[in-house]
Image (spheres, rainbow, N blue to C red):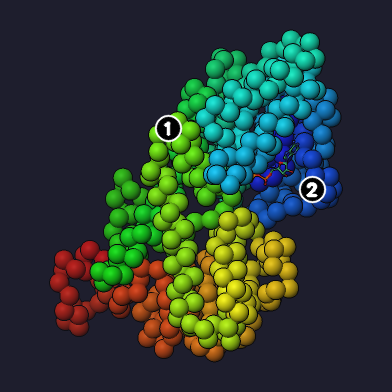
Amino acid sequence: MLSIMIIGAGYVGLVTGACFAQKGNHVVIVERSQEKINQLLQGKIPFYEPHLDEIVTQALREKTLTFVNNIQDGLKDHPSIIFLCVGTPSLPNGAADLSYVEQAALEIGQNVNHDVLVVNKSTVPVGTAHKVKNIIQSALTKRSITLEINVASNPEFLKEGDAVNDFLHPDRIVVGVDAENAAHLLHVLYKPFITPGRHFLCMNIKSAELTKYASNAMLALRISFMNQLSHLADLAGADIDQVKRGMAHDKRIGSYFLNAGVGYGGSCFPKDVAALAHMGTEYHFPMTLAQEIENVNHVQRVWFINRITTHYGPAIAQKTVGIWGLAFKPETDDIRSAPSIDVINELLAKGARVIAYDTVAEANIRAIFGDRITYASTARDVLQQADCLVILTEWKEFFTFGPSDFMELKDKTIFDGRNCFDPYTMKAAGLQYFCVGRNNSSKAISTTAHPRKHKTSQATTASL
Ligand SMILES: NC(=O)c1ccc[n+]([C@@H]2O[C@H](COP(=O)([O-])OP(=O)(O)OC[C@H]3O[C@@H](n4cnc5c(N)ncnc54)[C@H](O)[C@@H]3O)[C@@H](O)[C@H]2O)c1
């Protein structure tokens, strides 16, 4: 079992630390926010992540996990590996802000007194491991100390909302190393997570760093592609959901990240696509496709907002707009770059009143909008108080509602940014239902219906 230090108790650091501790390693997490540490020591997770509280509480009880608020204290147990799990938000020019990574590296260099492997788990541009090594080495040189400090890259692929499961059962573990002992140590650490069919992929450091951006950009590309295609589907009389089904059954394509909607948000895709585009600029190689992924995502968001505001025109100022879902996706309270922020800002700017519902993400939205909007305690409250409904997150609960529930809306109007409902059924019930790329949807044709009742050709039914 290894002694491990993690810097940063955010989504990635806390999940990483708790999961390594669950496998019996001794983990100390350095988190500079004492308020977060106090919550964690009481078994409270500072953000919403299913099942994380269970493994944190268990590790605290078994004393395999501890928290400290500074790197000097974290180094006292001489960890053999240090993981950097600090934030790398976007700078205004799209580049990744490395100040947290660099600060952590500096503090390691100023305080470490033993040989150690430093592993970058934060998402960082190609060449950052090299920078981190240099920062640590110069701090050691200033202290006139010689130590063997290896730096490796180990990008994290967990997704919020299923982070614990992703960490415990990863599709693949990517490690970028330039020393055999670093590869060996990381293999020992990850061995309990490598089950048949899961891959431990060892590569050079720069390839590992780029792999993370390539993976996120590819997922974002799929979303932007479907969003752009959704407009063509509407214009041409097709239904983007049916097109998706037709594509997804091709094993080479699969079904993930092919839902048209209001565009992607969150703490990773927007900043990572922007950082990839910026990296291209640095190497004088315009990453035009990455730029276009961003553009399409932006256009999609603007288009959706315009769909609402142009529907009402100046009358929007007399309307109460209900919003279902504030988080950037279900099963998280993360609202970083969430569409809800832009939608609410625009509605308020046009004079509309907003009543929103999302029990998980409400606190984070309150921190931005305070009492400029109203917060409903149930989804039904929104339907009873609003003129129209805007759906921005596809929380499971929303699928339990049907057309008769929406008749409570004063204007019987829904703008569904997540394609949660069947357009034909909604419209047949007398609702105005606006969705994404499904606005020509007709009654579903069943393959099991009596052939005499439906004069559809075999070719048509078979392809449904
Ligand atoms: N959130 C995700 O789903 C996800 C998934 C994969 C990769 N990543 C990447 O992982 C990194 C971390 O993301 P996150 O969402 O966990 O970030 P976060 O902002 O939620 O957490 C970072 C934490 O680090 C702490 N911190 C910063 N500097 C520190 C220092 N010097 N000492 C101690 N603590 C310090 C902050 O207080 C904060 O609690 C980012 O690069 C991100 O792109 C995130």
**Residue at disc 2, CB closer than 8 Å to ligand 1:** yes
Residue that numbered label 1 is attached to: 284
421 vs 61, nearest the viewer: 421
Give the residue type at disc 2.
Answer: Lys
Secondary element under disc 2, as helix, strand or loop, is: helix
Q: Give the residue displayed 41% in from the left and 87% down from the top.
A: 429
The CA span between labels 1 and 2 is 41 Å
Q: Quadrant of ligand 1?
A: top right
- The quarter of the image holding the N terminus is top right
As drawn, 246 above or below 269 = below
The residue lying toward the viewer, choosing from 458 and 243, is: 243
Is residue 346 placed above or below 185 in the rendered structure? Answer: below
Q: Residue drawn at (64%, 21%), measured in percent from left and top?
A: 133
Q: Amino acid at mark 1?
A: His
In the image, residue 4 above or below residue 328: above
Mark 1 residue element: loop
Q: Which residue is mark 2?
A: 36
Asked whether residue 342 appears in the rendered view, the answer is yes
Image quarter hosting the C terminus: bottom left
State left or right for residue 284 relative to residue 109.
Answer: left
Q: Nearer the viewer, residue 102 or 77?
A: 102
Residue 103 pos. (x, y %): 72, 32
The numbered mark, 1 or 2, whose residue comes first in the sequence reads: 2
| 415 to the left or right of 450 | right
Q: Nearer the viewer, residue 424 or 371?
A: 371
